[in-house]
Image: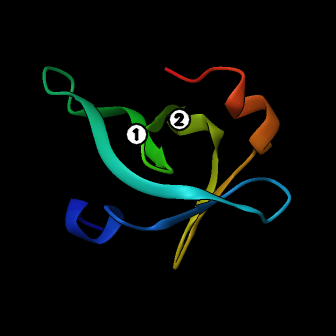
Amino acid sequence: MNVKELLGKEVLDVHGDKIGKVADLDVDMLHAVINHVILKSGLTKKYNIKVDEIVTIGDKVILRTGADELRKRVE
């Protein structure tokens, strides 16, 4: 999967509830790894999702985390 396919994908929490969409990626260019997936929810909320918090990426991105836990760490 390339970046264009990932950006804009709908993100669901562990309960299957829609949280938002993939807005950006935080990439470590020196080591060529993705540090975080940046999730946008609503007009102003953004969340940094660690790669290990993602269960699967297909038509949608499914997280191991619930929406309540994400809301506690709004940037």
Q: Mark 1 points at which residue?
A: 38
Rendered location of residue 46, percent (x, y): 46, 35
**Whether residue 2 is situated above or below residue 27 in the rendered picture:** below
Colour basis: rainbow
> Residue 65, can we see it?
no
Residue nearest the viewer, comparing 32 with 59: 59
Q: Quadrant of residue 20?
A: bottom right
| Point 48% across, 20% down: residue | 75
Query: In 3D space, how far apart are the residues under numbered discs 2 and 1 (Cα atoms)?
Result: 6 Å
**Label 1 packing within 10 angstroms: few (<14), some (14-19), many (20+):** some
| Point 43% across, 38% down: residue | 44
Residue placed farthest to the right in the image? Answer: 15
| Point 57% across, 24% down: residue | 74
**Relative to residue 69, is residue 74 drawn left or right?**
left
**Whether residue 31 is situated above or below residue 13 in the rendered picture:** above
> Residue 64, can we see it?
yes
**Relative to residue 15, is residue 62 drawn left or right?**
left
Rendered location of residue 54, percent (x, y): 61, 47
Residue nearest the viewer, comparing 64 with 19: 19
* Contact? badges 2 and 1 (CB < 8 Å): yes
Rendered location of residue 61, percent (x, y): 56, 62
**Label 2 packing within 10 angstroms: few (<14), some (14-19), many (20+):** some
**Whether residue 11 is situated above or below residue 38 in the rendered picture:** below
Counting residues from the start of the chain, the first of labels 2 and 1 encountered is: 1
Rendered location of residue 67, percent (x, y): 75, 43
Q: Quadrant of residue 62?
A: bottom right
Amino acid carrying label 1: it is Ile
Residue 16, labelled with which disc? none
Residue 49, labelled with which disc? 2
